[in-house]
Amino acid sequence: MSHWQFTSALGLLALGLANGCGPAPVSPAKPRSITTASGVPMIVVPAGSFQMGSNDHEADERPRHEVRLGMFLMDQFEVTHDLFVKAQLPNPSRWQDDSRKPVERVRWREAKLYCNERSLMEGFTPCYDEAKPGWPCDFTANGYRLPTEAEWEYAARAGSGRLYSFGAEAKLKANGWFADNAGKRTHVVGTRKPNAWGLHDLYGNVSEWCQDVYEPDYYKSSPVQDPLGPAEDGSDAKRVMKGGSWKASASMCRASFRKGQRTGDTDACFFTDYCGFRCVRHVMPDEVKSLLAKAAPEK
Amino acid sequence: MKPIQKFVTAAILCGVMLFQAISLKAGNVREELAGSRFKLVHESYVNNNWELFVTSADGKSSVNLTNTPGVNELYPQASPDGSRICFLVDSGTGRATVRSLWVMNADGTGRKKVVHQARQPCWAPDGETIAFLPQEYPKFNVTDYYTKGISFHHLPSGKTREHVNTKPLHHLYNISYAPNGKWIVATVHAGMGHRHTNLLIEANGSKIIDLGIDGCRPTFSPDGKHIAWGAGDHELAVVPIDIDSDNPKLGKKVFQVFDKQNKIYHVDWSPNGRFLSFSRGPNGKGDLTKPGTYEAACEIVGVHAKGWDIFAVQVAKGGSVTIGHKPVYEWMSLTRNGHSNKESDWFLPPSK
């Protein structure tokens, strides 16, 4: 067994333990990264639990409550122009000067369509049923989908209970593009520091669509295990956006900040130039083991 | 006659004259259109299928021109002489859908496919050439600006050619030819360095002029002296333009249509330039239980628009009109069944 295989095995043991045996958040010493069949880097987000929300800020962030989540993969970066075009989708972005920038002005449905296109490109079962009104999500499918709000916040916190995973607001300029440093525009993904799990741009650049219906009081009744958001009622309900953007204040970039955003699905032209997204994919420990085995050896 | 009787008589006469004046004005739209030979061709969704209908200018008669269950016809455009109609046909489903350009006679005979994978056509003034927007990628997407370049199909020769400056033309939609053949006007979204605007594109050259107006779907008046477009979801507007200039500029708005509640889209000019038609209906994102339709904003081509109908307004007098409000003589509905009636195009059929 080589050194990296031994290290991977230890990591997997930790992940497996966390997935099946305990709620404790796992902060791997080194982020576990894989590259998908279509060349997209993703981070293995370990199973665990965390305290979601905040009792000290906006009313819709209350109450702070425990959430437990299974393991999943999350895109290391926001979905870029390059990736959108690779899926043969019309790039709706306002800023088209660099294809490594995150797509914005993306409607909620277009984000879901991208998830399905990537699933098909990589031979997975799409999560969204495009034949049914509202494109319902099959959370058991092995394809790509938008993160739930809980998955997003868990990944953003990366084991930290603070406002930002990196600590004080003063460090935000080094960790994200927001109103104070972005110069009123988006930036190439991955040009700010990653969080402890290796995920970039969760704070700022573009706000990110989540799967959940936005309901201000949801945290009062949210389940502890794998919350999926309020029930769908078939209407064009607002959806949760997280993370703040190039035009957001530092407070709007907090891990627990949540915004109810109109989907844009009924607009022929959607001009909201901070709406972007990233994908997640549900995985089991055996698949992670296989994916990590294919990954490049660590140095 | 006593003074009081004179006063009463005068008051009655004034009342009668005022009533007659209002009545005469109230009949303007309907009466003038009823006396015209104009027709409108438009798309409707009936019996689980997109069809093209021809409706009389007063809305009193409507005929299913295509009547092809299982074939979805969309986006009709009448030729300048009113003898032919080009339109789109969607075949297949989902991302495997193919949208193609067809032509037929104005009576529905002589259907012929002319271009595979084409979008949003318009006739050139010569009546022999159809400009269209090639699809951006092979995989289907219902998005209206999913286009790359402009191409032209010449019907007599059967040949298709690209615009001389096609390479930078990206994410255009809803093209409309100027009557002098010099310009094509179009909306661009997230392309060519623009967030969203309306462009004048030289039909046979490389000049591109940003008209600097928000909104979408501009179209030239028959005499080329005005452009009408959707200035917003709830507003249509008309401005003057000098298309013979090498650097045309827009004047101030001379006519506006408002609807505070419903969306109003797809504006088109009557052949005499006195009226505008448009589609009107509630906001929505389509209905996936309807075969051959897609889930997106209901005003987009191929998306079912529940409750939408075709309306007409008198543009000649200028000013503004608010749909749904009195006075009703300024506007009228040409269809009333709400069967996703969209994309109307006026024409004057050839004399028999």
Image (tube, coloured by chain):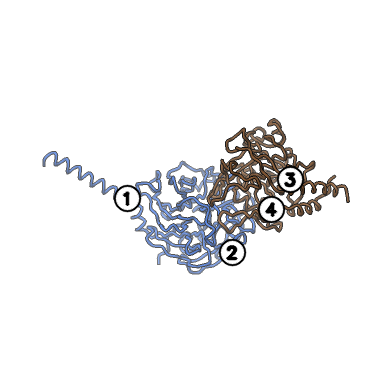
- Of callouts 1 and 2, which one flags the residue occurring earlier in the amino acid sequence? 1
**What is the secondary structure assignment of the residue under circle 3?**
loop
Say whether mark 3 and mark 2 are on the same chain. no
Q: Are marks 3 and 1 in contact (CB under 8 Å)?
A: no
Q: Amino acid at mark 2?
A: Gly
- Kindly identify which residue carries mark 3: A22
Are circles 1 and 2 on residues that touch, CB within 8 Å?
no
Numbered circle sitting on residue B92: 2
Please tell me whether mark 3 or mark 1 is closer to you in this view.
3
Q: Position of residue B137 (x, y in %)?
A: 64, 56
Mark 4 vs mark 3: which is more N-terminal? 3
Using the image, name the chain to which the residue with label 1 belongs: B
Quick check: do tags 1 and 2 share a chain?
Answer: yes
Q: Amino acid at mark 1?
A: Ala
Q: Of helix, strand and loop, which one carries label 1?
A: helix
**Label number found at residue B26:** 1
Chain for numbered disc 3: A
Of the residues shown, which amino acid type is indicated by label 3?
A: Gly
Outermost residue toward the bottom? B110
Q: Quadrant of the N terminus of chain B?
A: top left
Position of residue B58 relative to residue A66, above or below, is below
Q: Colour of chain B?
A: blue
Image colour assigned to chain A? brown
Lateral position of residue B76 relative to residue A102, left or right: left
